[in-house]
Amino acid sequence: MAPSVGPSQRWPSRRSRPIRSSRTQVQSYHEDSSSEDRLDEDADSDSEHLRRLSLSLRPRNPNRMPTSYREESTDDGFEGDPSDDPDAAVPVDAPTHFTYPFSDPVSNRSSTRVPHKRTVKTRSQSKRSKRTGSKQLEPGRPIHKRRKVEDATPFMGSGVIPPWETLPYQILFDIFYSASYPLIDEKDASRTSSVQWLVDVALLCRAFHEPALAALYHSPPLMPAAKAHGLLNLLSKPQEDLSTNYVNKIKELHIDAEMLLLYKSGPSLGYFELSKLIEKTPQLKKLRLYHSNDYVVGLPMLQTSRWSYPDSLFASLSLSSIRLRSWDWNGRFMDTTRLPPLMMEKHLQPTFQNLKKLSILHVTSYDYDSDDYTDDSNEREIVLATALKELPQLQRLEFLECSIVNEHLLPNLPQTLTSLTINNCEEVTALNFSAFLTSHGQHLRELVLNHNRHLSMSFIVGLGQWCQRLERFKMDISIHDRSSYHDVEPHFSELISPSEVPTWPSTLQDIELIQLRNWDDVTANVFFTSLIDAATELHDLRRLVISAILQIGWRDRASFRERWIGRLERTFLRRSAPPGPTLRSNPSALQPGPGSITGTTATDDMLHHSDAPRSGPSTPSKRKSARLAQRKLSEVEDNVDLSPSDRVAAEGEDDQKPLPVQGMCDVVMVRIDNQRPSDTQFNEEDFLDEEVSGDEDWNGVDLDAGDMSHAW
């Protein structure tokens, strides 16, 4: 055995041996390193200084590992005071703005490490020190925490930075507003990160200050309650003494009435006075008082909220000469017998005369406390209809969970409505809604019908005739019921009958039909055929989303899905290729390359796919439409009488016919299955791990076989 060697013999003094490159001072990439190990003659050398300065400015690969200045065999045996070792190099801390972190998959250590005293240990002692560390692993705790891998496509810009600070105020405001809103999450009653982002942007430069603050105070986040009190104190100060006039920037107020107005904000703040806030916002255009349970569709309203509309609220609106454009009436904040008369009284005031959008929530035609639901009196409907007619500029009307929307109210609604939304209203049926469209559909541009239990699609037969200006048509037949009955089935026998052929207005731009059910494959064939036949007239259609449920055999459903999804995509999906995501604002990318399509070819292709069908008559006569409908109905009846093999042959002949090509839809999403509708639809992505499984966290060192630090 070799004799033991003392530290003084094993590590001779610095002057008794030449300087090794691995033990010299590690050169910093950021600034000049200072150490007593450097030679005096090199410290003042200008050439050496310039060489190290060039190194600090040289671009480096972030994946490059730094050169280690320690021996590998003694990495885990550092202990003691670093001042005892004259060979230990002490790196200099670099400034923060020049720091380039190196990737270290083992422990993510910083490059500025404090060295320790080296001691000589055998291999067995080094392994034993690893196993008997001071920090014992807890049972079930991973050795190394996985880093979440984000598979994000890197942004490939053109390198051109527009002069953002030179843009006009209104354009910057629109950019900041679209990028940041909404500022609060009303479902979770919390702020979003956009609030702090707008504050940071406002402090970025002088040109961004005003538009960023205007976007922040356009609809200020009034939660938590302490922030609402702080806003009120800010508005109460003389605006002439402030750098910004905050009073004139507030245009909308969204207030959770029960959370902010019902309870005290604390012993020092007390109750929040909404009337004082309204007096400080003369430019207010939209005031919305909501309840947290309004977002839970199908929740039975067993009792109203303890907060109700105060008289001081309407007095402040009148004294401040505010002219609202949008307002909500919520049945949770007042007894349903007193709310319609209050609406008729307040709509006569100048504050509500300029209303363009009105939302009515939880207004019933009967009292929940009463056991008599058979009252046929339509007094409330008449009062509500009269109150709505007192608004001369009303254009958008929304009903949410209102049983008062029935055959007595619908015919008496204003004739000037351009947008109507009916959400989860029990008394709306296909019969009374068809009568409404007959008299009020000529001005409608948007029609949204969601979660209505008794409303089928029989009215769609006259949709093209009654609503000739309709641009957006959405319907969701999924039913939500949070009561103990949990009735999620529609209360109509069939969606449409095979003899009812839908008609579509030629002005449609967006069609979204979700959870179409209670029909068979024959009726679905008639429905999809009507879309294909109307393709040449739907020049403005840009979005088509259909989700259908067919309770038929899986083989028939698979063939039905394969047939109709392909036909709809070939008919409506846009033919021209979208612009490349890497083109951006690069001027050179606008010029055609050797493999690109020239302007003449692209124009001819677009005309071939989209403009050619327009050469025919744009609007067929009613006589021709009736004749086509009767012919389609006879074909469907003949197809029903055929055997399965003959039916397949007939469908094959239809597939061979040339399809009309509209080719202008950016989105064509058609889903046909037999899944039972639910509140939340799960797919494959919901069951995947958040982190990529594999060996991404392996540090290159295998654990010892005798390591018993794990619990399993």
Image (cartoon, grey):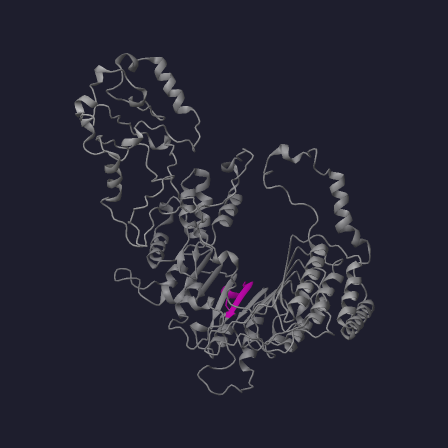
Location of the N terminus by quadrant is top left
Displayed quadrant of residue 190: bottom left
Image position, residue 491 (x, y; %): 59, 78
Q: Please indicate, yes or no, whether residue 502 appears anywhere in the rendered image.
A: no
Q: Residue at x 80, y 59 (%)?
A: 657
Q: Which residues are magenta?
A: 349-360
> Where residue 238 sits in the image (x, y, percent)?
35, 50
In the rendered image, which quarter is residue 23 located in? top left
Is residue 245 positioned above or below 103 on the image?
below
368 and 146: which is toward the camera: 146
Q: Please give left or right for residue 191 compared with residue 122 in the image.
A: right
Q: Could you tell me which residue is drawn at 65 percent across and 52 percent down? A: 666
The answer to whether residue 606 is above or below residue 637 is: above
Q: Quadrant of residue 565?
A: bottom right
Residue that lies at the very extreme toward the front in this rendered image: 1
Q: Is residue 359 magenta?
A: yes
Observer-nearest of 426 and 142: 142
